Each structure stands twice: as C-alpha cells, then as structure tokens.
Image (tube, helix red, strand yellow):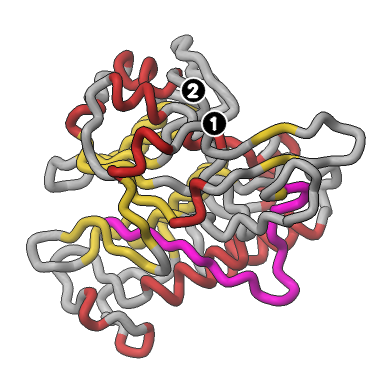
C-alpha cells in the first residue's frame, strides 16, 4: 500500500503549495486507489496532477467529516474527472459555524453539498470499503465514535447555528483504517472525537480484521475471536490530531494523546494538518517511536 499527500498545511520541499486542509490518495495492493478527504480548495486537485495522481481512477472518496477544509476541493475533484461514490456520515452536510467570543463568526461547513448528494453513500459505525481476494478487510471506515468519560474531544466553539445556540459535537467525525501485513494504519482527518476515544473505538471495531493471507474476516467481527496471526497494536497513526490550540507542552490533551498512543501499541506517528506546531514538537520529543511530520507530496509506503 502507498499513501500520497495531496493537501496539507505544510508545502512540499519541491514547491507544491500547502493550505489549511487535508487530502490524500490511498493506493491498495490490488492496484485500486481511494481518496481520503478533498482539502479546502482546488489545490488538492492541482497537486494531484503535479504528483501524477489520476483522480479519475479513484474507486471512491471517503470523508472524515463535513468541515470546509476537508470538503472544499470536491468540486475540483469532479472537474478533474473523479466520478465515484462519496462515503460520508449522514451528518456531514449539516450547517456548521465557528462561534467564538472575540472572533468573527464564520461558516465552517461543507459549502455546496447539493451537486453531489446523489453520489453520497451514507455510512455509520464501521463500514468495510475494500476487501482482498479472500474477503478480508483492507480498507475500513469508522465513524459514530463514542466519547468516553474523562477523554478529551475537540469540539470547542462549534455550532449548528450562527448565534451559538446549538452545539456541534462533530458526530460525523470519522477515520480510515488500512489493514496491512505489519498491522493497522489509522488515518485521521481532524480527530475531533479525541485520539483516546478514536483509538478505543477503532481497536474495538477492527480487532477482528486480519492482514491478507491469514484467517478470519468480516463475518467474525469480534475482538473475542481475533485472529492470533494478526499483528497487534497499530503500525502507524497519521493525520490531524486537532491539538493546534494547545499552548503548554504539558497540556492534558497532549499527555492523554501520548498515553493513548502507548496504550494501544502505536509504533510510528505521522502528525499533520491541525495537530499544531507545538504539539508536533512535543510528540516528536516524547513519543518513543519514529515521528515524521506530514507535508504536501509526501509518499508513504506501507
């Protein structure tokens, strides 16, 4: 498997522009390609062309949630030839606003979902998007992530209305799981559910999922009968952790994220997008495994 970063906050060393957004192409071992998020603008499509990623060949687009920085590039994807289904939680198209005292109120939702409503395939809970020749899951989408007591979530100042009366808990927050021979790879969007909650939900939902060539599969979706040949833990966690507002290296949200990474056996980390510069530095210093920050044009072999 291979990931190619099309949109990210950090531009590429070769000069491809960045933006406050996220989008990547996911190449599976069978030759198929999927898209995760669409960035904030047409920049993801422009970078895709420069990186020789043919959007017209994508089997589908999966959305992490309905914020503008993950959906704003969909129109440009269509113009570039994307013609597949869009997998998204049913709550992703609802109106959304950022309402913060002392700051200008602004819309932050999916600006124009109407032209693609016919393409949307609603997802809830755990949805297997792709399998191998034996029916084992290769690509899984997890949403409706439970918010457990005591765990951080990142939904401050989000509302479904412009006057701040209807809080938005970003229940459509989703993540993508790649099942590789070395273990699960967790691809995040913004992780509004919080990393501890997300890892708990994904671990419970995909513990059954085996790597290609081993026993088990979707019909045996239970952690109680997980295949003993599957690699435990997570090979990598990649994407936005939504820690960009953190100003203290010992902030409880950072400490909890580090604890969750250890508790769920995460072996490497590729943070980016909304993680924030301070949190990125702290994670790089304190996480015991390899840490590499994302940037536009990065190619990640799995």
Specify start and end residues of the magenta stretch as a single range. 139-158
How far apart are the two marked residues, 2 and 1, measured between alpha carbons?
8 Å
Q: Nearer the N terminus, badge 2 or badge 1? A: 1
| Label 2 secondary element | loop
Q: Badge 1: how crowded within 10 Å, few (<14), some, or many (20+)? A: many
Q: Is residue 73 above or below residue 13?
A: below
Task: Kindly indicate the quadrant of the structure image that contains residue 55.
Answer: top left
User: Any magenta on residue 23?
Assistant: no
Residue 230 is left or right of residue 36, and the answer is: left
**Which residue position is annotated with label 2?**
41
Q: Badge 2: how crowded within 10 Å, few (<14), some, or many (20+)? A: many
List the single residue furthest toward the left: 133
**Which residue position is annotated with label 1?**
21
Q: State the quadrant of the N terminus.
A: top left
Where residue 240 appears, as percent x and y from the top left, is 57, 44
Task: Examine the rendering and report whether any part of residue 255 can be seen.
Answer: yes
User: Any magenta on residue 157?
Assistant: yes
């Amino acid at each position: 498997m291979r990931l190619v970063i099309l949109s990210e906050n950090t531009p590429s060393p070769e000069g491809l522009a960045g933006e406050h957004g996220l989008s990547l192409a996911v190449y599976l071992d069978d030759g198929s390609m999927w898209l995760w998020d669409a960035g904030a603008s047409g920049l993801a499509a422009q970078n895709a062309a420069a990186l020789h990623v043919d959007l017209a060949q994508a089997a589908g687009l999966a959305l992490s949630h309905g914020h503008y920085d993950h959906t704003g590039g969909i129109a440009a994807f269509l113009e570039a030839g994307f013609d597949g289904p869009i997998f998204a939680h049913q709550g992703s198209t609802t109106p959304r606003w950022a309402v913060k005292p002392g700051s200008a109120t602004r819309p932050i939702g999916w600006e124009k979902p109407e032209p693609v409503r016919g393409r949307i395939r609603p997802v809830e809970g755990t949805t297997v998007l792709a399998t191998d020749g034996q029916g084992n899951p290769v690509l899984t989408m997890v949403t409706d992530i439970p918010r457990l007591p005591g765990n951080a979530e990142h939904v401050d100042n989000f509302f479904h209305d412009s006057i701040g009366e209807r809080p938005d808990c970003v229940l459509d927050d989703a993540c993508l799981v790649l099942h590789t021979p070395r273990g699960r790879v967790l691809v995040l969007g913004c992780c509004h559910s919080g990393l501890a909650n997300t890892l708990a939900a994904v671990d419970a939902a995909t513990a059954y999922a085996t790597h290609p060539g081993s026993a088990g599969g979707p019909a045996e979706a239970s952690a109680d009968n997980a295949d003993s040949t599957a690699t435990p833990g997570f090979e990598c966690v990649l994407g936005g952790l939504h820690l960009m507002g953190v100003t203290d290296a010992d902030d409880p949200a950072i400490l909890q994220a580090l604890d969750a990474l250890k508790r769920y056996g995460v072996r490497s980390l590729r943070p980016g997008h909304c993680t924030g510069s301070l949190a990125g530095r702290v994670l790089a210093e304190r996480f015991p495994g390899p840490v590499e920050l994302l940037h536009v044009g990065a190619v990640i072999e799995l």
